[in-house]
Every structure is written in structure tokens, then in C-alpha cells.
Amino acid sequence: MEGPSFRALGLRPPEAGCPSPREVVTALQRVSAEDPSRGTEAFAQLVDAEAVAGPRHLSLAVLRADRARRQGRVRLKDPGAAFLLYLSGTDQFSEAVRRAGISPETREGVLVVVPEADPRPWVEALGWPLSPEAYPRPARPETLLRLGARPEEVRGLSPDRLELLAMEQTALADLPRG
């Protein structure tokens, strides 16, 4: 898969529910705004690690969001929000936040920086320590259930097959509902 370069790493909140999702978004946007040379397509997004089925899943979500932006099919101004739609496999932003966004219950996160850049400014702004256990890790059935798969679709699948199923859902986010 060829697409924009990105950097992803696992993080852990210092304690459950701290900081709030709103504070996280504000911190990420503040750091991103400090370097206008990164361009309007650049973003940093923190997602719940439980919504990430693996590196290929992240890569496809980054690629699909970038392709939709270049083709003028993104109705959201924030490229990080578009990425969240593709990662979660839905075309509804509120559902994408529910599936993949961080919440007070988030135990581990994945910081995604597009295009690839030194993630330290965002990590420092968030105050979340690194957590190599959070990313990358093998896909789990709970991840696919969180992303909207049915239990019978994930039962007995290997981590590799689970990641492929997550990628399929990511690709289907573009199809019109009818």
C-alpha cells in the first residue's frame, strides 16, 4: 500500500479518564498549529488502541482518508477526523468517535502522525507515557466487535485474518449506504 507516510506509537494515559478527550484534541491541535509548514493535510490523531487491528489497518485508513481528500470526497475539514471515519469503518462521525476515539475508559492509545514526523512534541503535550504493548500488537476479536463486526464473523479467526477483516470494513466505509 502506497500512501502518505505516517508514524504510529502506543501510549498509555497517566490515569484513567485523564486528560479528557476534549483536552487531548486541544493539545494535538495546538502542537500541529505550531508548525504550519506541515500543510493542511497533516494531522495528529490519538485513537483508542482497542480500535486498531494492526499496522496494515492503520496504513489503509491513512491511505483511504488521503485519497478521499485528494478526490474531494471528504465532507470533514479536519483530516484527522476523516482518518477516524476510515479507521472505524463508518461514514458517521459520532459513530467513528464511539468506535475508535478515546474516552475516559481508554487504557491505551495509538498516536498517529501524518505525514511522518518526530512524535515527541505531541507525546509531551499529551503527557501520556509510551506503551510499546499498545502498538503494534496482534488483532483481537474484541477489536473487530468494537468496529462493528458480528461475533460469528470473528469467531475462530487468526490475528492476521482479523486484521484483514478490519481492513475490509475500512474499505467499505466509502460505499454508499442503500
Image (tube, rainbow, N blue to C red):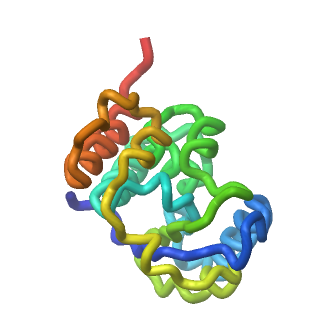
The furthest residue to the top: 178
Quadrant where the C terminus is found in the figure: top left
The furthest residue to the front: 156
- Tell me where residue 127 appears, x and y as whole percent: 70, 83
Residue sitting nearer the eye, 143 or 116: 143
Residue sitting nearer the eye, 94 or 32: 94
Above or below for 87 versus 137: above
- Tell me where residue 151 appears, x and y as whole percent: 38, 31
Side of 73 relative to 95 (left or right): left
Q: Is residue 157 visible?
A: yes
Instruction: Name the residue located 78 percent from the left edge and 63 percent from the top edge.
Output: 20
Side of 18 relative to 107 (left or right): right
Side of 152 relative to 116 (left or right): left
Above or below for 28 versus 141: below
Instruction: Name the residue located 34 percent from the left edge and 32 percent from the top edge.
Output: 172
Instruction: Name the residue located 65 percent from the left edge and 80 percent from the top edge.
Output: 128
Instruction: Name the residue located 36 percent from the left edge and 41 percent from the top edge.
Output: 170
Quadrant where the N terminus is found in the figure: bottom left
Residue sitting nearer the eye, 153 or 163: 153
Side of 37 relative to 139 (left or right): right
Residue sitting nearer the eye, 94 or 68: 94
Q: Is residue 174 visible?
A: no
Above or below for 69 versus 133: above
State how many labels appear.
0
- Tell me where residue 56 appears, x and y as whole percent: 28, 58
- Tell me where residue 97 appears, x and y as whole percent: 62, 45
